[in-house]
Amino acid sequence: MSLIPSFFSGRRSNVFDPFSLDVWDPLKDFPFSNSSPSASFPRENPAFVSTRVDWKETPEAHVFKADLPGLKKEEVKVEVEDDRVLQISGERSVEKEDKNDEWHRVERSSGKFLRRFRLPENAKMDKVKASMENGVLTVTVPKEEIKKAEVKSIEISG
């Protein structure tokens, strides 16, 4: 018999382990389909669907970095379109469920993602390179050298 009352009747809880406490779900009894996180295994997680990408500009290039943990380079696609658009896309499949498995927490993300960026006029679209290392995709778009306008002095007569 526990000296501490359980407010999560029937749920596993251990006061000394903060990760064992289930969070009370006020929507679990509503008749909406999939309204509750505990209602079913999520098919897509918005954290992965809206993949975050850093874009920095150096004197030589535009550099894009995307964190894509757990993906192989074969599962990611990098494309450039004629109208100077860089497109990064891919998909992480949902882990197969076994009917005998009981999920306690699902936090890893899955689903499709697509990000598009309009590149500036100085981007060399035919020289784009991409690499992937340790789950980080790096796309480098070299810049054309900006030609400074020639200034010609005009002699003033008179």
Image: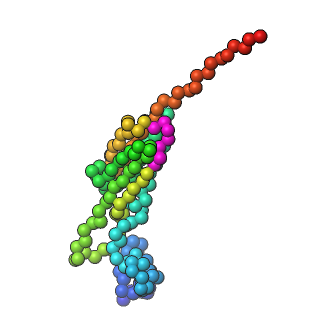
Q: How is the image coloured?
A: rainbow
130 to the left or right of 30: left
> Is residue 84 placed above or below 116 in the rendered structure?
above
Total labels drawn: 0
Residue 85 x, y percent position in the rendering: 43, 46
Question: Which range is magenta?
Answer: 117-123
Between residues 112 and 82, which one lies in front from this camera angle? 82
Furthest toward the right, the residue is: 158
Q: Residue at x 38, y 45 (%)?
A: 80
> Is residue 33 placed above or below 138 in the rendered structure?
below
Residue 62 x, y percent position in the rendering: 46, 40
Q: Residue at x 35, y 47 (%)?
A: 78
Give the dominant element type of the magenta stretch: helix, strand or loop.
loop
Reply yes or no: does residue 100 show up in magenta: no
Residue 12 x, y percent position in the rendering: 35, 80
Furthest toward the front, the residue is: 158
Q: Residue at x 36, y 89 (%)?
A: 1
Between residues 97 and 114, which one lies in front from this camera angle? 114
Q: Residue at x 42, y 72 (%)?
A: 18
Asked which quadrant contains residue 107, the reply is bottom left
Residue 29 x, y percent position in the rendering: 42, 86
> Is residue 42 placed above or below 155 in the rendered structure?
below
Location of the C terminus by quadrant is top right
Whether residue 50 can be seen here: yes
Reply yes or no: does residue 121 show up in magenta: yes
Asked which quadrant contains residue 100, the reply is bottom left
90 to the left or right of 63: left
Furthest toward the bottom, the residue is: 1
> Is residue 87 placed above or below 152 in the rendered structure?
below
Whether residue 17 can be seen here: no
